[in-house]
Image (cartoon, helix red, strand yellow):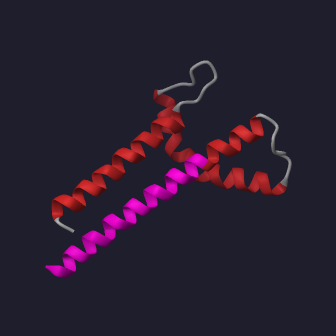
Amino acid sequence: MVVGNALIAAFLDITYILLDLFKWALIVSAIVSWLVAFGIINSYSRFVRTVGDTLARITEPALQPIRRVIPAINGIDLSPLVLFFIIIFLQRIVIHLEIYLGL
């Protein structure tokens, strides 16, 4: 049973880390989009375009369903904030599962 517990603990740890990485990708994506929108960084730069496209490919599949439910309010897209709170909620579930299972 020790091996089973170790596998479950590893799975929960990896899940937590992946959620954390996704949370950071969401934060960086929002910051890059703001910097482009305010003209602070050049959106025609190859590096900026590559970073923005990569982050969009990572985050957009999770943001689109939220945008269908919660439209932009006065031009402000709240879907990243909602997704951020969902990720925090899922991370709390992972932590409580580890505590509950005694891992």
Magenta stretch contains residue 6: yes
Looking at the rendering, which quadrant does residue 72 occupy?
Answer: top right
Residue at the spot 17% in from the left edge and 58% down from the top edge: 100
The picture places residue 94, in percent across and down from the top left corner, at: 30, 56
Give the tally of numbered discs: 0
The picture places residue 7, in percent across and down from the top left corner, at: 27, 75
The picture places residue 16, in percent across and down from the top left corner, at: 38, 60
Residue at the spot 41% in from the left edge and 47% down from the top edge: 87
- The image quadrant where one finds the C terminus is bottom left
The picture places residue 55, in percent across and down from the top left corner, at: 63, 52
Residue at the spot 21% in from the left edge and 81% down from the top edge: 3
Magenta stretch contains residue 48: no
Magenta stretch secondary structure, dominant: helix
- The image quadrant where one finds the N terminus is bottom left
In the rendered structure, which segment of residues is drawn in magenta? 1-27
Looking at the rendering, which quadrant does residue 41 occupy?
Answer: top right
Above or below for 65 versus 52? above
Residue projecting furthest to the left: 1
Residue projecting furthest to the top: 74
Above or below for 71 versus 12? above
